[in-house]
Image: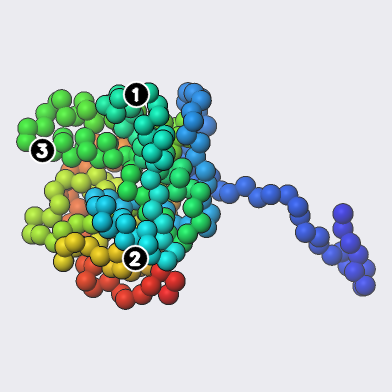
Amino acid sequence: MTRIGAKGDPMPTACSCARLPPDRSGLSGGGDRRESKIVPMRRESSTVVVLVEADDGLLAGLARSPNVSVARAPAAEKSGTGQPDAARPGWETGALAMREAAQRRSTYVIVPDDPLSEVAGRWRAMWDVPGGLGAAAGFEEQAADALDAWRNKRFELPDYYLVLAPVQPDGTGPDLYLGPLRAVRPRRVAVAAITDAPAQPAQVINVLRALEHGPWWPPLDELLDAARGFYPGGLTDTRSTPLSDAPERGPGG
């Protein structure tokens, strides 16, 4: 219904219809539509960051920080499937943690469990000595499982990955996050170079405040293809941020 103003001009009225959030996952809607208890939820108000290789002490400190929360898979759901840990999909714990993160309303949500963690581990194993065909087959198995789950909308990627990397001449070695993922989306994978161990929560928060905006992730199958064609050592620009050099700003400043 349109209202008419004093001069006869139409006046817009507020629309009561809900606006759906944009689909940033790149999903085409295809694939097996098996039912799952893991229902992904869109995030609008929080920045979700997977913190790679974070210890419990650091996570506990971050959880006490203003405007920061830590999301993990609920304990009951992690152990309530009736399956032994070795038989559960490698992506499932991370998917449950991402679902938990989607319900938080803090400025930053830290997630230490990544749906791609098993893929990352198998990718690194391909470059270990000895790697061989067995390691490559392990990567392909985990990649296929994760891709199937992603296509069935059981998880989505975080807004950012943040890797805590020690400062050393040889770097971190083959790393899925610092290698192919960062090569494809450099602003979606941040690096915090640890100059003084252990990392402190306030320092990590300051690095979070320095995260840059950038294009969203491409479809997961494209990321996996990039990983297959990536050679460790080919990406020379790591652009890490030493934690001791991070700007001294709080999460709200």
Q: Residue at x 20, y 46 (%)?
A: 175
Percent coordinates x, y for residue 121 in the rendering: 22, 38
**What label does residue 83 carry, if any?**
1
Label 2's element? Answer: helix
Secondary structure of the residue carrying numbered label 3: loop
- Where, quadrant-wise, is the N terminus in this rendering? bottom right
Going by the numbered disc 3, the residue's amino acid type is Asp
Residue 182 percent coordinates (x, y): 29, 52
CA separation in Å, label 3 and label 1: 30 Å
Q: Earlier in the sequence, mark 1 or mark 2?
A: 1
Indicate the secondary structure of the residue bearing disc 1: loop
Tell me if 62 is positioned left or right of 22 in this view. left
Determine which residue is flagged by label 3: 128
Q: Is residue 36 above or below residue 113?
A: above
Badge number at residue 244: none
Cα–Cα gap, marks 1 and 2:
37 Å
What's the residue type where badge 1 is placed? Gln
Report x, y in % for residue 83: 34, 23
Circle 1 crowding by C-alpha within 10 Å: few under 14, some 14–19, many from 20: few
Instruction: Tell me, yes or no, if residue 146 can be seen here.
Output: no
Give the foreground label among 3 and 1.
1
Residue 89 occupies quadrant: top left
Name the residue nearer the viewer: 121 or 8.
121
The residue to which callout 2 is attached is 205
Question: What is the CA distance from the residue labelled 3 to the residue labelled 2?
Answer: 33 Å
Which of these two is toward me, 159 or 82? 82
Q: Quadrant of residue 100?
A: top left
> Contact, CB < 8 Å: mark 1 with mark 2?
no
Residue at 38 percent of width and 65 percent of height: 65
